[in-house]
Image: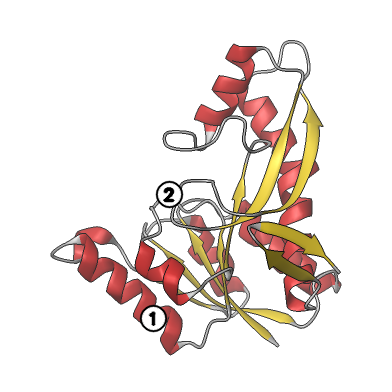
């Protein structure tokens, strides 16, 4: 059974998609063991508690420096015996110490088709603002492994979503979540939980 630790910063809609997929049997051989947020008021923590999952806040402001914060976060994940870390709208940079401790065992969902509209500064509505400003006709979402860069790790799954004339950033954000994020994030977790993924020279292959 794959033990998952989910890191979140906000409402936790992607967390809910994971929990729903587990309940529905769309994710097998996996369970969410712990949910951690950097934000004590994140509704994602309430979602976890409703599923009887341990939910806690580990915030940078509660530690003397970033290194102490990173060590506390990593220590908690290791203490729980977490096998896979899922970044589900987590707005804190992942440090090298965590990437080294969990090589190809940290995944992230990004609301664009990487390598477009990704990297430093591209998160949340800012991604969709940039998509609309550029006038592209197709956007989407990407699930990828996390490496030392920002949105540069091996790509696991992508799903395209059409941009409609007159879209607002919030409308596009919602469509990308519903049509792409909430589908491919659970799918990626299921592939990992059932040993259906290999990574060779930075390229993901599905068995």
Nearer to the camera, 166 or 127 = 127
* Horizontal and vertical percent position of residue 36: 45, 68
The label on residue 76 is: 1
The label on residue 112 is: none
The label on residue 91 is: 2
Q: Quadrant of residue 176?
A: top right
* Horizontal and vertical percent position of residue 59: 30, 62
Colouring scheme applied when the structure was drawn: secondary structure
* Horizontal and vertical percent position of residue 107: 59, 61
Location of the C terminus by quadrant is bottom right
Under circle 1, the secondary element is helix
Q: Residues within 10 Å of mark 1 (few under 14, many from 20)?
A: some
Q: Residue at x 29, y 74 (%)?
A: 71
Along the horizontal axis of the image, is 18 left or right of 79? right
Q: CA distance from mark 1 to mark 2?
A: 18 Å
Q: Quadrant of residue 112?
A: top right
Using the image, determine if residue 25 lies above or below residue 107.
below
Nearer to the camera, 30 or 136 = 136
Using the image, determine if residue 48 lies above or below residue 204.
below
Location of the N terminus by quadrant is bottom right
Q: Residue at x 69, y 41 (%)?
A: 141
- The answer, for residue 13, to whether it is visible in the render is yes
Along the horizontal axis of the image, is 166 left or right of 68? right
Q: Quadrant of residue 129?
A: top right
Q: Residues within 10 Å of mark 2 (few under 14, many from 20)?
A: some
* Horizontal and vertical percent position of residue 136: 71, 17
């Amino acid at each position: 059974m794959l033990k998952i630790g989910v890191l979140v910063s906000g409402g936790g809609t992607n967390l809910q998609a994971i929990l729903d997929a587990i309940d529905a049997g769309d994710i097998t051989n996996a369970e969410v063991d712990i949910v951690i947020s950097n934000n004590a008021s994140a509704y994602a923590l309430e979602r976890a508690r409703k599923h009887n999952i341990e939910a806690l806040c580990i915030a940078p402001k509660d530690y003397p420096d970033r290194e102490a914060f990173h060590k506390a976060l990593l220590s908690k994940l290791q203490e729980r015996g977490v096998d896979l870390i899922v970044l589900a709208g987590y707005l804190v940079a992942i440090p090298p110490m965590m990437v080294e401790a969990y090589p190809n065992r940290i995944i992230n969902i990004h609301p664009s088709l990487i390598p477009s509209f990704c990297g430093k500064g591209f998160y949340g509505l800012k991604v969709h603002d940039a998509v609309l400003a550029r006038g592209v006709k197709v956007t989407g979402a990407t699930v990828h492994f996390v490496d030392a860069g920002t949105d540069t790790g091996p790509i696991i799954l992508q799903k395209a979503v059409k941009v409609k004339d007159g879209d607002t950033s919030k409308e596009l954000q919602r469509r990308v979540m519903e049509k792409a994020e909430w589908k491919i994030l659970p799918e990626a977790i299921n592939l990992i939980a059932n040993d259906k993924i290999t990574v060779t020279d930075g390229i993901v292959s599905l068995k």
